[in-house]
Image (cartoon, rainbow, N blue to C red):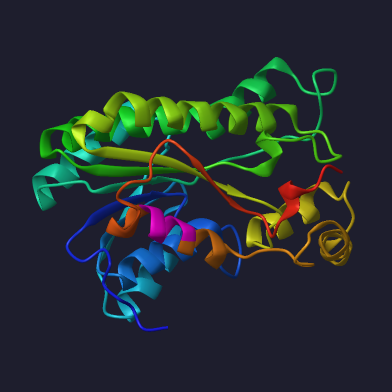
Amino acid sequence: MTASQRLQGKVAIVTGAGSCGPGWGNGRATAVLFAREGATVILVDLDRQAAAETAALIEGEGNRCEVAALDVLDLDATVALAEHCDKTYGRIDILHCNVGRGSPGGPLELSVEQFRRDLDMNLTSAFIGCKAVLPVMIRQGTGVITTVGSIGGLRHLGHDHVGYSAGKAGLVQFTRQIAGQYGRHGIRANTIIPGMMDTPLMAVRVAKQGHRGDMAALHEEARRRVPLGRRGTGWDVAHAALYLASDEAAYITGTELLIDGGFMVQTA
């Protein structure tokens, strides 16, 4: 597909822009697509090597990016990154909050520390990102914030990840609050809600946890439970993120975009 340069001249920060294994995770696909569409993309990831691999893909296509290896829960480092972007590029147009984690279990299985870590990665990380970039966006009078939630934050799916689910549920309302409070400053905020996805992260979780079977079993689950009969990919999330970041979505804020193959239209 030929790039249409919908983000020409924009500066985008994408968190979780690396990948935990071979292939296209949500963050990597979004970062590459943003760059193809003309944005200068700041690739944020705790794993510098993973971010550098994404950078190599972007630069190999002749597009612009910069690697920022930092912990998205580190407020000082995140603020420093926002200040660097402001000083270097004069603006921050897009913040795409893509990080997340989940520990299997409910209140009886999880420790308080595990629950807090899940809340921090899925929710506090977005709060810190917004705290850092909002002053720049307010000053320039424009900006787009997209967060990546999960259908697991909307419904119990038959397996227990109470910290992850609570964090993703909170992320939806957090994003709505940002939209309501800062819309008068020209800032839009929306949440992308992926469904059953086929990404490197899923493969890693299967290898580590194994409690939900192998990848073949997960693909069979999607064939049975998803109306479109398959899992989505990182590119499905990336194209949703591009749409929400573009001027084509200029009157869309404070809402959620389901990328789930129709899963949530069902009641079971």
Q: Nearer the viewer, residue 169 or 218?
A: 169
Q: Nearer the viewer, residue 10 or 88?
A: 10
Q: What secondary structure is the stretch in magenta mostly built from?
A: helix
Quadrant for the C terminus in the image: top right
Q: Residue 35, image x and y in percent?
A: 31, 67
Q: Which residues are magenta?
A: 240-244
Relative side of 240 to 179, left or right = right
Vertical comparison of 132 with 251: above or below: above
Q: Is residue 49 visible?
A: no
Which residue appears farthest toward the bottom when viewing the image? 2
Q: Residue 39, image x and y in percent?
A: 25, 63
**Is residue 129 within the magenta segment?**
no
Relative side of 198 to 189, left or right = right
Residue drawn at point x = 79 percent, y = 54 percent: 206
Quadrant for the N terminus in the image: bottom left
Vertical comparison of 223 with 213: above or below: below
Residue drawn at point x = 72 percent, y = 47 percent: 264
Image quadrant of residue 267?
Answer: top right
Residue drawn at point x = 23 percent, y = 35 percent: 80
Relative side of 17 to 143, left or right = right
Q: Is residue 208 visible?
A: yes
Q: Residue 81, image x and y in percent?
A: 25, 41
